[in-house]
Amino acid sequence: MEETRFEIRFGVTLAVFAAFLALNDLLAGRFGDDELQLSNEKTSSYLWYQSKGIKESLAEGQKDLVDAMLIGGAIKPEAVTSLQKMGQELEGLMSRYKKEKKEILIGSKNIPPESWSQEVDGKLGNVVGAQEIESKLEILGRAGDRFDIATLFLQLSLVLGAIGLIMKSVKIRQAIFMLTVGVGTLGIGALLAALGSLS
């Protein structure tokens, strides 16, 4: 009778740890998908940043050429004014690209509204910066590590439990049961730590 109750308690304990393992796998998969999506967004943001940098460099090169032509006197006097105007327009472009790069890098919410220059879905102030995305990715990465640790401990608890159920010696079964509970509890703790790091 006592042995039957012990086996039932052992079985229920294993079922609880199996349920936590299933929950852990579900959550890890969900946040793993989020991590993949954020990684793609980060790549896109840096490509966007890089394209603005290339445009800024091209405008800077053109401005240098205009300045060289003006300083060198290679321009007819009647064309000087239009060339100076072109130089000012290029300076404006360079300034605009610099502002856009900053917004793409750190995000709209980290700069004053009057400095917003990039539209997302037709609205200003909606740019999520590449550095913001990196911060979110770091959080998801740490949580992912904890989900992995939770999986390891929960799976170990199930393996230990299976071994404990087939043992004949009562003392060994009870020792393995305690070990199973300890390892499973560590797994649940790691799962809770993963969820806590996401909030």
Image (cartoon, rainbow, N blue to C red):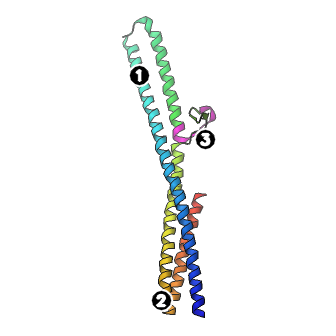
In the picture, the disc for residue 167 is: 2
Q: In this picture, which residue range is highlighted in magenta? A: 103-115
Q: Earlier in the sequence, mark 3 or mark 2?
A: 3
Circle 1 Cα neighbour tier, 10 Å, few/some/many (<14 / 14–19 / ≥20): some
Residue in view at x 49 percent, y 89 percent: 172
In percent of width and height, residue 118 lies at 56, 33
Q: Amino acid at mark 2?
A: Met
Res 191 → quadrant: bottom right
N-terminal of the pair, mark 1 or mark 2, is 1
The x and y percentages for residue 6 are 58, 88
Find out whether the residues at labels 1 and 3 contact each other: C-beta distance under 8 Å: no
* Element type where label 1 sits in the image: helix
Q: Quadrant of residue 188?
A: bottom right
Left/right placement of residue 68 relative to residue 90 reads left
Q: Is residue 114 magenta?
A: yes
Residue at x-position 42% and y-position 29%: 57
Q: Residue beneath label 3, please?
A: 109
Where residue 109 appears, as percent x and y from the top left, is 61, 41
Q: Is residue 37 above or below residue 144?
A: above
Q: Secondary structure at mark 2?
A: loop
Dominant secondary structure, magenta? helix
As drawn, 91 above or below 4: above
> Circle 1 sits on which residue?
62
Percent from the top left, x then y, of residue 19? 57, 71
- Which residue occupies 57% across, 66% down? 23
Q: Amino acid at mark 1?
A: Gln
Position of 194 relative to 13 (above/below): above
Asked if residue 122 lies left or right of residue 171, the reply is right
Q: Secondary structure at mark 3?
A: helix
Q: Determine the CA span between mark 1 and mark 3.
A: 32 Å
How packed mark 2 is, by other alpha carbons closer than 10 Å (few <14, some 14-19, many 20 or more), is few
